[in-house]
Image (cartoon, rainbow, N blue to C red):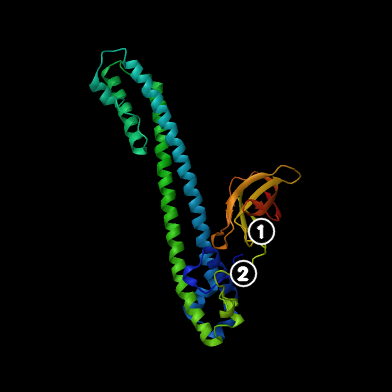
Amino acid sequence: MAHLKSNDIGNDPIEVRLYRLLRMQNNINTHRVELGISGPLLTWARGSYDRFSGAVTVSSVESGESVDANKIAKDKFFAAKKYYQKAKEILIAFLDQYKPDEILMASYKVDQPTSKTYNGIIKQINSLVETHNRLVAEGDDRVVAQSIIDNMVVLRDAFLAEVEASGIEEREMDVAYKTQHSYYNEDTDKLRLIYKIACMVWGDDDPRLKDLGFLPASEVWTPGQPEPWLPPWPGPVETFIVTYLGEKEVQIDYSGVQEATIGYLDRRKVGSEDWILVANDLPMNEEDILPFRERHVPPGTWEYRFTPVKDGEKGEPSFVSIEVV
């Protein structure tokens, strides 16, 4: 769980913004009459956390799917490129049995280095396939086995399909992040307005400000002071929550520890002695902490362990068990 350091609303990290909105949504009804909050502003406040947290979740999911799609497309690219290179070498060796024909070599495009780009390799494969088909139609025997061409076409088409899928995922990710940023900016303006109203009614040091996701003036953190409310080193962390999201995906929420630089996350099957490393570089700076998601977790009952780390030294670990189905 994020902790507030200031009322610098426009520079909120995502986790801090989520915390402000959660407090706002949970408590606005208690104070709405006294503060005179009504109409569209009240409607927004009552659903502010749900709206923004939903947008953050969608952005996270779309980002993960985009990364996965890009990886698959890259794998398909290297498979097509590797096969093309081998087919080209066979074709060149085969053509060496005939009288040199620079025009034919140029038509096949095997007189050029194998491209390292997506578009380049597609053009080279297409040139080889088109020249092959033309020569077959003309009865020219300066061609490799049809099965080689057929396999290359399969790999090319598989790559092109993944490029298209990757493009769709990237577009969906962009839309999701634009929505998230739009909500963030809208929420910033509304939070500032309610903060100003609350300060006018209660004063800027009233503890009720915390109900709505703000800080009383006397509790605003000054840079150079110890991080507020964080457990001292070596911990453990105050918050370590593991949630099963379904489809073999697990989300880990954690908080910080004073002086900790990174966190280690690992898991083991309940009853096993062997730990499996999940991540060894999770940020412990509170402004950088975001929920971490692990995909493709095998079914079973797992024990997760989170350990704060300071300059290579491990702190006190936290443990949570969860069942993945």
Mark 2 element type: loop
Q: Residues within 10 Å of mark 2 (few under 14, many from 20)?
A: some
Is 166 left or right of 253, judged from the image as shown? left
Residue type highlighted by circle 1: Phe
The residue sitting at the left extreme is 103
* Residue 244 horizontal/vertical position (percent): 64, 53
Mark 1 element type: strand
Q: How many marks?
A: 2
Q: The N terminus lies in which quarter of the figure?
A: bottom right
Residue type highlighted by circle 2: Pro
**Mark 2, residue position:** 228
Q: Nearer the viewer, residue 222 or 83?
A: 222
> Residue at 62% of width from left, 53% of height from top?
311
* Residue 13 horizontal/vertical position (percent): 51, 64
Q: Quadrant of residue 240?
A: bottom right
Image vertical order of residue 179 relative to residue 46, above or below: above
Q: Residue 96: tell me if it is visible.
A: yes
Q: Residues within 10 Å of mark 1 (few under 14, many from 20)?
A: some
* Residue 210 horizontal/vertical position (percent): 59, 77
Image vertical order of residue 117 relative to residue 12, above or below: above
Residue 240's tag is 1
Upstream in the sequence, badge 2 or badge 1?
2
Image vertical order of residue 250 relative to residue 226, above or below: above
> Residue at 66% of width from left, 58% of height from top?
241
For discs 2 and 1, the disc positioned in front in the rendered view: 2
Is 243 left or right of 290, judged from the image as shown? right
Q: Quadrant of residue 88?
A: top left
> Residue at 28% of width from left, 16% of height from top?
140
Image vertical order of residue 10 relative to residue 100, above or below: below
* Residue 242 horizontal/vertical position (percent): 65, 55
Alpha-carbon distance for marks 2 and 1? 18 Å
